[in-house]
Image (cartoon, coloured by chain):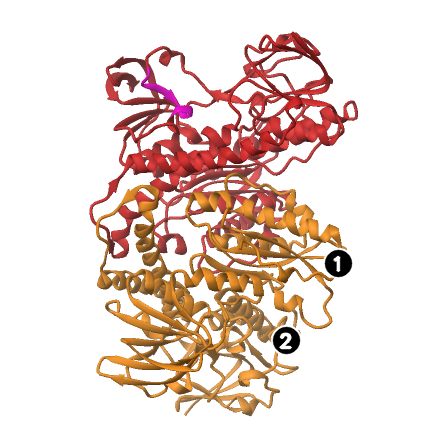
Chain colours: A orange, B red
Amino acid sequence: MQKLKVDVAVIGAGTAGLVAYRSAKAQGARAVMIEGGPYGTTCARVGCMPSKLLIAAAEAAHMIDLAPAFGVHAGEKRVDGVAVMERVRRERDRFVGFVLEGVDNIPDQDKLRGYARFTGPHTLVVDDHTEVEAARIVIATGSAPTQLPKLQDVGPGVITSDEVFYWQDLPRSVAVIGTGVIGLELGQALTRLGVRVSVFARGGSVAQLTDPVVLRNAARVMAEELDLHFQSEIVGAVQDGDEVVLTIRQNGEERAMRFQYVLQAAGRTPNVAGIGIEQLGLALGANGVPLFDSRTMQCGTSHVFIAGDANNERPVLPEAADHGKIAGDNAGRYPDIRPGLRRAPLTIAFTEPNIVSLGASYKQLCAPGKPKFAIGQVSFENQGRSRVMLQNKGMLRVYGEYGTGRFLGAEMIGPRAEHIGHLLSWAVQCRVTVEQMLEMPFYHPVVEEGVRTALRDLAANIARGCSDIDPDEVEPGT
Amino acid sequence: MQKLKVDVAVIGAGTAGLVAYRSAKAQGARAVMIEGGPYGTTCARVGCMPSKLLIAAAEAAHMIDLAPAFGVHAGEKRVDGVAVMERVRRERDRFVGFVLEGVDNIPDQDKLRGYARFTGPHTLVVDDHTEVEAARIVIATGSAPTQLPKLQDVGPGVITSDEVFYWQDLPRSVAVIGTGVIGLELGQALTRLGVRVSVFARGGSVAQLTDPVVLRNAARVMAEELDLHFQSEIVGAVQDGDEVVLTIRQNGEERAMRFQYVLQAAGRTPNVAGIGIEQLGLALGANGVPLFDSRTMQCGTSHVFIAGDANNERPVLPEAADHGKIAGDNAGRYPDIRPGLRRAPLTIAFTEPNIVSLGASYKQLCAPGKPKFAIGQVSFENQGRSRVMLQNKGMLRVYGEYGTGRFLGAEMIGPRAEHIGHLLSWAVQCRVTVEQMLEMPFYHPVVEEGVRTALRDLAANIARGCSDIDPDEVEPGT
């Protein structure tokens, strides 16, 4: 077995791992990056990019359906599933290609191929060919779609989002399990592309939302288009030829339905099992993820850092890149550990309307011991520009601090919310007050004017002062 | 003749006038608002709102054309011009209705119907029925599409944007004169709706752009879709039945072409002629507009204030509202004049891609005596998300201050630029540095990542320090 001694071993060559490797090198460390699977990030291969490509096709199909309301008529719509998936794969491969070029540019001696297993706090075995002794270690092993116990070993019809983007054609029917970001994005896109889709969720969650008023609105808006079933429990599934018979229990009744595919989209599990993590002697938290400091990515006071989806903090690409930078920097300069740049939180589901949360979430603000906060809100149902574009759905709730008047965060489903999310998360990071935001430019007619309405409402509520009236008792726009 | 004595007379009941009237009243002044034309603002009746409605229909038509590239096929597209214009007028009338409701809520004794003419510094005659003696006056008379001398008295085929939104059907063909915001918005929308459109401009300007590199890019991008003729001089026009024969001189050659309509979109002229403005004894600037202080809206040190399009500063709705607020406040509390809230400049042309400028323009930054500034740029041709959506056109140039690193402004043509414009104009108003902006959240995959690329370029150029290399010498993306 080959033996190797390095300053920093990075496990995983995804977004977090690549950035961590480069950052450690930039600190002058001798670093290696270890990867067992194919090169290319989750984002480029099976995540952000291909899903947005599928969504772009779905929006084109949706606009054809919407056009008559503007006086523009298309003939009969025909979705060429082979062509749709061909573009998705072609463009996806192009994005993956950029990642692969980046990997190619890394010197061969810094790249180890194979799966890494800890044999001690400072030692790793890569497959059976190399033993690595590393002064510091960055765990950037990523995550995988969560496999549901009830759906294990059913057959080829039970899949995850990893398989969707390798389809050669659109399927006839899909049951989507889960109403998180991925389930809703894919469920809506496939529906718009003419696939018969049903979406099932164990509970009542909608993407990453925590604000009950926005959540109720989002559930209603999404259900206008999607065959959406909350409070539905999977009883079991059986492969039958090229279909899966899925049995669901809802309201105490069991129902069996046939789908070509059952797509598991019930979250992602960090890849920390089966790598011998117990050899590190670290305190482990939920999902077996080592406890770590989110400003330094350091696990306890150890020589181990954890970055990206593997740490299960916020499994989205921008965070993975920031994690990787911080973990790589600190692994490189260890023991001189420094807190890295963390930005205002921002999460976007690219459904239509987009579902966005930023800054402090409603749930975080409601945590025990937190002071009361003020809320402002707007419905987009009669918002001028949204109505002009026939995208007048959704609502925004904005949160502010009594006393200081500082803007804290927001949750939203609404048109162009991915952009509103940037605007408002920048405002959170700039630590501005709601009054200062109202002094900013708002053009006309724009969706941002809806944001202004919510901010005016928030400013008035802040000025009114803290009271015991529960703003959630008032359901708006109904 | 009825005689009336008031604290504040507001001439005009458009956006600026309505806000000025309300603001003066809020200061406790006895105020009247004088309007000769129909109630309803330029924005709602013939401006922002109906043009965005036409554009929304045009985008639907455009998406049908674009859909096959995603693998989604529509049958033969058919634009129902009657239905398109019916929705434009119906929704327009709804927006106008909101304005009219607001006017209805103003006490009758505060509303004077008729055209006002100054007979002295403090006296106005309204039509022939009322003489108003006013301690202070707000001129909010708005603007009208500029009438071109060569196109006067030709016949019913020569129109302005005022007439477009009363069409019962889409015309067969339109010559648009002017490549300002209105000319390009309408020219592109009508083209996308199947109208044969040619656009002619005397010079080479594109919307409000002043940055030569962005302007060149914008001219090329717009010309991909539009039959666009720069450096074209109108020789004359003759009405022939239901068509106009328009003669244009370009490159020394004259060419006569037939169009159903010739649409004058060569700017707007402030409505300050014919109201006896010379009676006020004020110093007048360009277009006969009194010189005024843009922080107070006061004309010299007089009792006269000028707000909205009438002052010809930036004839867009949000500015008119801010002007009206400042002018009304100050007219109300005169002689205690105070500077009002002016926001970071933001101008948006709702073409596709949007054309946006914000903060300090390239031209302003290049003014004699100004220090050198740094530039960063990005092309959207290979920007990830823009390409996913097949909206990968355009470019952004961002400007920053050497030394301080402060972000100064930007000019752009590109996807979703109306939202980028808000993000960046807020950054200008927050007086943040380029480095601070790079620490803000950027999600993935989003158009905002293109902004980050430009900001990184700008940060590098600021760090490099001031040099004599002309950044405009380098044409990007070619």
**Residue A275: x, y in percent?**
47, 88
Amino acid type indicated by mark 1:
Cys
Give the answer, above or below, for where B324 lies relative to A448: above
Is residue B139 at all visible to an observer of this figure? yes
Residue B59 included in the magenta stretch of the image: no
**Left or right relative to A36: residue B256:** left
**Residue B436: x, y in percent?**
61, 53
Depth check, front residue: B329 or B112? B112
Residue B160 included in the magenta stretch of the image: yes
**Residue A397: x, y in percent?**
59, 57
Give the answer, above or below, for where A251 lies relative to B446: below
Which mark is on residue A293?
Answer: 2
Q: State how many labels appear.
A: 2
**Residue B30: x, y in percent?**
73, 23
Give the answer, above or below, for where A49 lies relative to A230: above
* Disc 1 chain ID: A
Q: Residue at x 30, y 76 (%)?
A: A261
**Left or right relative to A279: residue B262:** left
Depth check, front residue: A115 or A311? A311
Residue at the extreme right: B336
Depth check, front residue: A103 or A223? A223
Q: Which residues are magenta?
A: B156-163
Query: What crowding class fits label 1: few (fewer than 14 Cα within 10 Å), some (14-19), or many (20 or more)?
Result: some
Query: What crowding class fits label 2: few (fewer than 14 Cα within 10 Å), some (14-19), or many (20 or more)?
Result: some
The residue to which callout 1 is attached is A466
* Disc 2 chain ID: A
Amino acid type indicated by mark 2:
Asp
User: Marks 2 and 1, how far apart in space?
Assistant: 34 Å
Q: Residue at x 72, y 53 (%)?
A: A462
Q: Of the two numbered discs 2 and 1 on the same chain, state the one appearing first in sequence.
A: 2
SS for tag 2? loop
